[in-house]
């Protein structure tokens, strides 16, 4: 499989390493913005975007217009997500966006939903989320933390929304910390006067994110449509 890397920072380099180990070729490396690069659709099976928020929408939609499927892990641009989906469909391309491609995190998402469903009737428990990332991460809270919050909101009728730091009684507070050399730690906490329940996912390196992105690209090749990591996991479990 021939892969275009859109974003060639630490994540891009980790994806390159994993992709090559799995027998794939890197045919294009874009630092951030695709505008000044020659994108050859005849030599590109899938693009993987881990660029920056300001470049993501242009990178993704340029690929769609060339008929190139895109796996995107860039966060902080989702106000344009519906537009991107529409352009994908108009060009019969394919798209997977995920706030986190780690296979372990996607299992964590499933646990979060099950726990939220169990806790929705226990009114003595408040819920909060903490995320810790490296100082180079530009957006806060992380896309993963937002996904966790949205899953809880969907399951718990007592929760109306989320806020960064200061939240109302019916909102989930998300606390974002930036620390040197932390790939990503997410904690969901339910707290009451008598006890506390926590689920935690701790990334040990970028390799997990990179592997998940490459596995998603393998899944997306030769497909059309909008997919999620649930589809990728279902395919893995079936095989």
Image: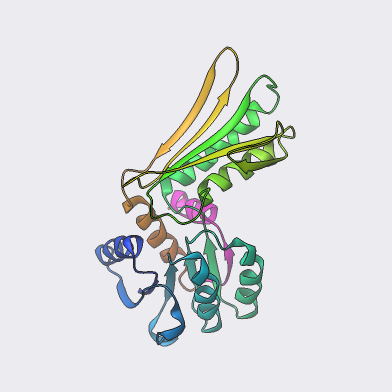
| Helix, strand or loop: magenta stretch | helix
The residue lying at 63 percent from left, 76 percent from top is 87
Q: Position of residue 162 (x, y in %)?
A: 65, 42
- In the image, residue 227 lies in the stretch drawn in magenta: yes
Residue 92 in the image: x percent, y percent? 60, 78
Picture quarter containing residue 159? Answer: top right
Q: Position of residue 4 (x, y in %)?
A: 38, 75
Q: Does residue 136 sit above or below 36 in this rendering?
A: above
Give the residue drawn at x 45%, y 71%: 221
Q: Which residues are magenta?
A: 223-238
**Residue nearest the viewer, comparing 176 with 230:** 176
Quadrant where the N terminus is found in the figure: bottom left
Q: Is residue 131 magenta?
A: no
Q: Say left or right for 60 vs 150.
A: left
Seen in the picture, residue 176 relative to 192 is either above or below; the reply is below
Seen in the image, is 183 located left or right of residue 146?
left
Closest to the observer: 108 or 35?
35
Q: How many marks?
A: 0
């Amino acid at each position: 499989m021939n892969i275009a890397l859109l974003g060639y920072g630490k994540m891009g380099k980790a994806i390159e390493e994993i992709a090559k180990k799995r027998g794939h070729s890197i045919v294009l490396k874009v630092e951030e913005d695709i505008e000044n690069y020659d994108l050859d659709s005849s030599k590109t099976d899938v693009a993987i975007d881990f660029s920056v928020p300001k470049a993501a929408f242009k990178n993704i939609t340029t690929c769609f217009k060339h008929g190139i499927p895109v796996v995107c892990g860039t966060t902080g641009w989702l106000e344009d997500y519906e537009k991107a989906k529409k352009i994908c469909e108009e060009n019969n391309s394919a798209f997977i966006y995920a706030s986190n491609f780690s296979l372990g995190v996607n299992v964590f998402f499933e646990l979060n939903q099950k726990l939220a469903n169990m806790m929705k009737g226990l009114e003595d428990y408040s819920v909060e989320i903490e995320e810790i990332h490296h100082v180079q991460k530009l957006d806060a809270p992380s896309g993963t933390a937002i996904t966790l919050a949205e899953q809880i909101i969907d399951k718990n009728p007592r929760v109306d929304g989320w806020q960064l730091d200061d939240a109302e009684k019916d909102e989930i507070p998300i606390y974002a910390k930036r620390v040197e050399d932390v790939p990503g730690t997410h904690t969901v906490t339910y707290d009451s006067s008598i006890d506390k329940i926590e689920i935690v996912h701790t990334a040990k390196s970028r390799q997990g994110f990179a592997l998940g992105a490459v596995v998603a690209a393998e899944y997306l090749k030769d497909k059309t449509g909008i997919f999620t990591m649930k589809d990728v996991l279902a395919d893995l479990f079936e095989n």
